[in-house]
Image (spheres, rainbow, N blue to C red):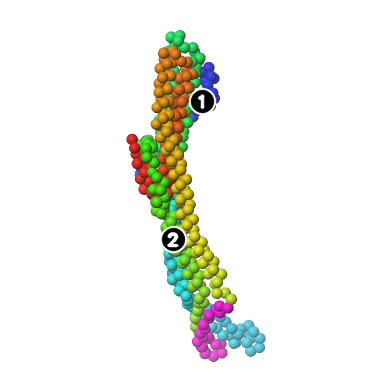
Amino acid sequence: MSATLFFRSIPRSVALAVLLMANAVRAQETTTPPGVGAPLTLAGVLTRVAENNPSLIAQRYGERAAEALIEQAGLRPNPTLDVSAENFLGTGNVQGGRSLETTVQASQTFERGGKRDRRVALASREREMAAKEFVVRRAEVLAAAAVAYVETLAAQERLALVEEPLALARETLAVVEARVKEGAASPAESARARAALASAQGESARAQAALFAARAALAATWGGRAGEIGALPGKISVPKTLPGEEVFLAQIGRHPRFELQRAVIEGRRASLELEKAQAAQDVTVGGGVRFLREGTDAAFVAGVSVPLPVRNKNQGNIRAARETLAGAEQSLRAVEAELRASVTAAWQELAGAHTTAQTLRRDALPATEEAHAVVRRAYEEGQLPLIDVLDAQRALVSVRREILDAESAYASALARVEGLTNPAFSLTTALISAR
């Protein structure tokens, strides 16, 4: 069969997948700098992300801004200089500037009720909140990076997985062509074998593209590029025993969202204290000199100004601050409920993936491998047609893909659970470090 007829005999999607594989390999070769791509461990990735993640770098400026506001909160009110002129441009005896009187006076407002200390306390609490928000954001970014690492490792294993059926397809084609030459098989079987090989090449192309995309997503967590990542060490290996849900639930108190919410509560309490202090009326004291136009006489002037709290005692702001504080205190329970729900959901996915992976690896895989070996041997002996061999190969590849999908889902769920309970990701590290 000619090459033209062969490509016409296979689906267009398979031919397109082959072209995609070539393009993905070519793109990877052109984007990978020489000398770059040393193996990255999960710990190494987390260190990179903590130091170079763009969103974390941007959020650090929020802490600096909060620090500056503490300085501003501690400043006292500025004094006021008042210059006034009286008795000029009138009529009669005060016509023109003959009776002009000029007063130069300085005044200073003295805050009462400890407003300055309360402002500093509130600004300090807001700085603490900014610091806690950074810790929460850092935990979220590291958890996302851990999941991206697991997904990249899974994509790497998927590529390795499709290489095996690709090799089987090549071997099958060689056997079929030998049988065709011997007259023991028809040319149609050769065409089927070639189509199966093209399909396997298409799967390899898609796996190549998926791996490149996963590397790009992983590198983006520290602001890098896919070409910086080479082959990741280790492999996903699901353990026989499943960690209990209660083990993770007992650790949710370590999540930084609790510390953030406590800081928010203290900030709302500081805001309430400031609003209470605002109810105290400030005193403004002023003094100066008045110059008289007639003669050279001058006199001192002085005054005291105190607002009368007849209607506005800041009662509305005090009430609002009190209600906001109560809401913040209730939100602490909401944080715990949300974290528990997230951990439970991730653990359920973890348990389901664990059961699936263990069942497939223990029961389905050995049986499928045995069936494939029997069918392959029977075909070589001329007892079965090629279609049975191809079906057995597809079944074997399908089971192995299902196992890898289950193991990948387990690893991703474990990374998410540890992102909520254990920022060191010790179980995830142990999982993907197994050989």
Instruction: Name the residue nearer the viewer: 270 or 61.
Output: 270
The answer to if 25 sits in the magenta stretch is no
Q: Is residue 15 visible?
A: yes
Instruction: Name the residue nearer the viewer: 179 or 246.
Output: 246
Please tell me which residue is depicted at 49% across the width and 55% down the height of the picture. Answer: 334
Q: Is residue 135 visible?
A: no
Extreme residue in the left direction: 435
Q: Of the numbered discs in the image, which one, if any, rests on residue 14?
A: 1
Mark 1: amino acid: Val
Residue matched to label 2: 263
Q: Residues within 10 Å of mark 1 (few under 14, many from 20)?
A: many
The answer to if 291 sits in the magenta stretch is yes
Q: Residues within 10 Å of mark 2 (few under 14, many from 20)?
A: many
Extreme residue in the top direction: 183
Please tell me whether mark 1 sits on a helix, a strand or a loop: helix
Earlier-in-chain disc, 1 versus 2: 1
Name which quarter of the figure residue 363 lies in: top left
Q: From the viewer's perspective, is the residue at label 1 or at label 2 nearer?
A: 2
Extreme residue in the right direction: 91
Mark 2: amino acid: Ala
Q: Which residues are magenta?
A: 290-310
Please tell me which residue is depicted at 46% across the width and 37% down the height of the picture. Answer: 213
Please tell me whether mark 2 sits on a helix, a strand or a loop: helix
Q: Is residue 142 left or right of residue 81?
A: left
In percent of width and height, residue 387 lies at: 49, 18
Q: Which quarter of the image is occupied by the C terminus?
A: top left
Instruction: Name the residue nearer the viewer: 22 or 259.
Output: 259
